[in-house]
Image (cartoon, helix red, strand yellow):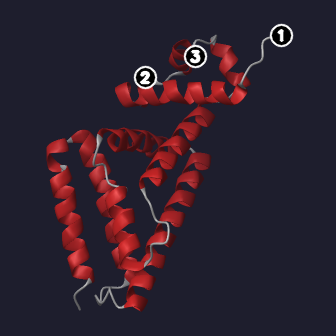
Amino acid sequence: MPKIIDHDQRRSDIVDVTWDLITRGGIEAATMREIAAAAGFANGALKLYFPSKEDIIEATYERALGMMRAYVELDELRGLVALRELCFSSMPIDAERIAAGRVLLTFWQLSLTNPKLHDKYLEHVREWRGLLHRYLTEGREDGNIVTETPDEQLVDEIVLLNAGANVMSLVSGEFSTVALQHQHLESFFTRLTRP
């Protein structure tokens, strides 16, 4: 009887080892040869599951985004409360989120020279910024957000706070502790509630 192969599980296993290689050694460690060896495949066999390294990295990036989305519980939330949940939950405040940040940083690096990956990242940023705008609008409608600072500037600040915290947590953790991240976000949210 022929062996039944679970192709989805194999793809997931390949992403697992790619994730591990990236988080331990950066993108340089995640060569096709190393990925294949760690997954227990011959080098060419990876192409049965992913046509290229770019596709493996994209799938690993999607996993990182999925993890970050899983941390954010926005059901039934709106306005200021939803904005706080989104901002605080997406910061690199524990080992898993720092690891996800490392994968995201790798993706950012590759997207600088790869138009497909760049477009993928821009799609994520537009979606994220859209959510931030939505919750700011709702917060203003509810009367909880009263700052005169334009929403576009507030969205820029949130994105820069988050991206900066992710980078600093990887390269210089003492300048991006959980306490500092909370302090910066609390300061930001205090400003939202004052004219």
Identify residue for label 3: 36
Q: Amino acid at mark 1?
A: Pro
Give 156 or 23, whichever is nearer the viewer. 23
- Give the image location of residue 111, x and y in percent: 51, 46
Label 1, residues with CA under 10 Å away: few <14, some 14-19, many ≥20:
few
- Report the side of 93 relative to 21 (left or right): left
Identify residue for label 2: 29
Report helix, strand or loop for mark 2: helix
Identify residue for label 1: 2
Q: Nearer the viewer, mark 2 or mark 3?
A: 3
Residue drawn at (36%, 39%) of the image = 96
Label 2 or label 3, whichever comes before in sequence order: 2
Whether the residues at callouts 2 and 3 have beta carbons within 8 Å, the answer is no
Label 2, residues with CA under 10 Å away: few <14, some 14-19, many ≥20:
some
- Give the image location of residue 74, x and y in percent: 46, 65
> Residue 101 sits in which quadrant?
top left
Give 73 or 179, whichever is nearer the viewer. 73
